[in-house]
Every structure is written in C-alpha cells, then in structure tokens.
Image (cartoon, rainbow, N blue to C red):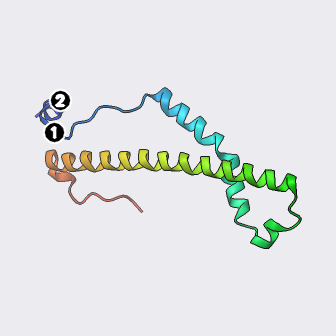
Amino acid sequence: MAIESVAEQDECAFDALLTREQVGQLEDTARSFDPARRVAAITLTRSKAQLLDDIDVDAAKALLLIHEQISSYIEHLDSMREMATTALARTLVVMDDALRLHPELDGVELDA
C-alpha cells in the first residue's frame, strides 16, 4: 500500500504547519529571549532580602522591567510548549501508523 493512499484515507492525516523559514524565525525569536532567561535565572540566585537591599527608584524601575521581561518570556515558553506538544502528538500518530504498516518495527528501541 503506497504511503500516499494511506494518507488519503487517514483521518489523522496532517499537513506541515511551518516552513523552514518560519522555523528559522522561531529560532531567532527564541534567541531573543536569552537575556530574559538569564535575568530569570539570576533573580533566582537572590533572596528577598538581597532583592530588597538598597531599593530605590532606579532599582524599582529595573525590577518592573525585569518583571515585564520574565512575563514575556513565560508567554513565549507557553507557546513553545504548545508547539512541542503538537510535535509530540504528531510523532505518536506517525509511530502508530508506522507500526501498523510495518509490524517488524515493533520493539525497536533507541540505542543507549
């Protein structure tokens, strides 16, 4: 049975969601969050007392900026999690069909 005919009959068939160019753009976007990721990590290295130490107007403004950066980073991570979940579901669909079409694949494991 040809793969095309299986896909035509398959209610779980799916098309590509992204182009290679879009993947490149996603990578650029992910890299743009590196500073926010680092700020979030560094914030976790400080106690509340350390974060409050010598707080003034400039430090309060910086803290607000950090808050906005981390909030934006969380939104980005949520969308990346959704994308990864979709990719995971696609692999499950393909693995299920692959096992149905090629029973000899049953029991295949990753090399350690």
Disc marking residue 48: none
Q: Secondary structure at mark 2?
A: helix
Q: Secondary structure at mark 1?
A: loop
Work out whether residue 47 can be spotted. Answer: no
Q: Quadrant of residue 2?
A: top left
- 10 sits left or right of 86 in the view: left
Front disc: 1 or 2: 1
Q: Amino acid at mark 1?
A: Glu
Q: Of marks 1 and 2, which one's residue comes earlier in the chain?
A: 2
Judge by depth and name the residue closer to the eye, 78 or 89: 78
Q: Which residue is mark 2?
A: 4
* Quadrant (top left, top right, bottom left, bottom right) of the N terminus: top left
For the point 29% across and 31% down, which residue is it? 15
- The location of residue 84, given as percent across then percent down, is 42, 48
* Quadrant (top left, top right, bottom left, bottom right) of the C terminus: bottom left
Disc marking residue 11: 1
Judge by depth and name the residue closer to the eye, 92 or 100: 92
Residue occupying the far front of the picture: 57
For the point 61% across and 51% down, which residue is it? 71
Q: Amino acid at mark 2?
A: Glu
Work out whether residue 93 can be spotted. Answer: yes
How packed mark 1 is, by other alpha carbons closer than 10 Å (few <14, some 14-19, many 20 or more), is few
How packed mark 2 is, by other alpha carbons closer than 10 Å (few <14, some 14-19, many 20 or more), is few
- 81 sits left or right of 1 in the view: right
- 77 sits left or right of 15 in the view: right
**Taking 69 as reference, is 51 above or below it?**
below
Alpha-carbon distance for marks 1 and 2?
13 Å
Judge by depth and name the residue closer to the eye, 100 or 12: 12
- The location of residue 74, given as percent across then percent down, is 57, 51
Q: Quadrant of residue 41?
A: bottom right
